[in-house]
Structures are given as C-alpha cells and as structure tokens.
Amino acid sequence: MDKPIYKRVVLKLSGEALKGDKDFGLDEKTIMNIAEEVKKLQSAGVEVAIIVGGGNFWRGRSGKEMDRTTADYMGMLATVINALAMQDALENIDVLTRVQTAIEMRQIAEPYIRRKAVRHLEKGRVVIFAAGTGNPYFTTDTTAALRAAEIESEVILLAKKGVDGVYDSDPKENPNAKKFNELKYKDMLNLELKVMDSTAASLCKDNNIPIIVFGIENPTNISKVVFGAKIGTKLKED
C-alpha cells in the first residue's frame, strides 16, 4: 500500500525495546533503527506521538522493599532518560521533535499541555511523552491509552519485544499457543490475557481506540503496520 491508513498514531515503546540485545540501558543502533521508521511515517504525512517505558533502567515494581510511590516515581524518571535518547536519535536525522513530561523539568523538556502537543503534531513535529501520567500506580500502557484519547489518535501501535502478537497462552511455555489476528477488548479482559493492564484496556475500550500489538525485533514493522500490512494482533471494541 502506497499511502498510510492512519493520520495520527501513538507509538508505545517499552524500555526493553530500546536496549536491543543488551541486558541493561540503551542500544544506540536499535534506537536509530526505530527513529528511521518514525521518519518514514513523518515523511508520509503521519502525525506521530511516542510513549516510552523505562524498564531498561527501572520498573516501579522492582523496588519490592521500597515505598511504592517512590519506586514508581523512579520509574517515571527512567522514562525521561529514554525520551531524551529517542529525541536525540530523531533530531540526528532531521526530524523535528518535542519531549513533554508529566512531571515538570523545564530545563530539559516542555510540561505536558494537550493543546500544545496537538499543535506540535499538526506542524509535523514528533511528540514524545515522558514521565508516564505523572502519578504513581499507573503504567506507561495506561499513559498510552490516556494520551491517545486526549490527542484523538486513531490507533495505538504497541511494539513489544519477545512476542509478535497476542496469544491465548504464553508461546514461550506452550508451543501450541494460538495467535489471534483480531481480538475484542472484552474477550481480552475475560480471558485475562496479559497484553496490557486492565486500566489501559478499559480506557481504550471506552474510547473505541484500536491497538495493534506487534514485535519490535524488526523495527520496519512500525511503518508496515501504518501502511496497512496485516502484522501482529489488532485489538478493538466492535
């Protein structure tokens, strides 16, 4: 397909997606490969917002002996590191980019303002949302659902590492696991499939925002999905 099928998308990247084959931190080659795919979308007139996780540095639930709120705030700061790395990669290939954080840190990023984010997108800039929702007890999956609803994104691209879609059981443990091409949100919730947390799924369900879950090991999947390729699993309400 020569033309993209979506005008405005939210790309959700886990922290694991940015570390490549490393055990920890960032892999510059992987980040640059992802940036190249985002540039393809921007060049085709697609408005792109990115949500980044922080699991390559820290997850809130990693601090088992910590106060949960403190551990979650540490996770939010990890997402800011990833957002800046993604911004740097994009700007190195001449893609105009803005980072907006849910926790104010004016020296390095704009505070999140919905109208300003939408205006950036309309001007062809890529917007990277960092620091989650700014609140503990909420995942970056929930951030993706919330921001997608706020900016009226047509779809969430949920790029996963280690899996190429949604299965009825863990394909790593069950070689006979069945992959879904399409799945309704209510079925995902009823089957208790661990695609994303229930808060994020409910937000997408209530706002009728489809999600496409696909593997990020091959970053070209990002542009392929937006240009209409049948990759991964599509989650939708109807």
Image (cartoon, helix red, strand yellow):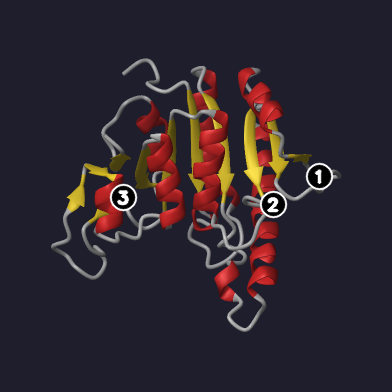
The structure residue drawn at horizontal position 64% and vertical position 51%, both measured from the top left corner, is 82
Q: Residue at x 52, y 17 (%)?
A: 45
Q: Amino acid at mark 2?
A: Val
Residue 140 image point, x, y percent: 55, 53
Callout 2 environment at 10 Å: few (<14), some (14 to 19), or many (20+)? many
Image location of residue 168, percent across then percent down: 21, 58
**Residues under labels 1 and 3: Cα distance?**
34 Å
Circle 1 residues within 10 Å: few <14, some 14–19, many ≥20: few
Can you name the residue that lies furthest to the left here?
Answer: 176
Q: Judge left or right: residue 194 versus residue 31.
A: left
User: Mark 3 and mark 2: span between their CA atoms?
Assistant: 26 Å
Instruction: In the rendered structure, find residue 80 and report the number of the disc placed on it.
Output: 2
Q: Mark 2 and 1 residues: CB-CB less than 8 Å, in contact?
A: yes
Question: Reading the chain from its start, which is encountered first: label 1 or label 3?
Answer: 1
Labelled disc at residue 164? 3
Residue beneath label 1, please?
Answer: 108
Mark 3 vs 2, N-terminal side: 2
Residue type beneath disc 3: Asp
| Circles 3 and 2 in contact, beta carbons < 8 Å | no
Q: Earlier in the sequence, mark 2 or mark 1?
A: 2
Image quarter in which the N terminus is found: top left
Q: Residue furthest right?
A: 107
Query: Residue 147: which quarter of the image?
Result: top right
Where on the picture, by quarter, is residue 226? Answer: top left
- Does 136 sit above or below residue 228? below
Q: Secondary structure at mark 2?
A: helix
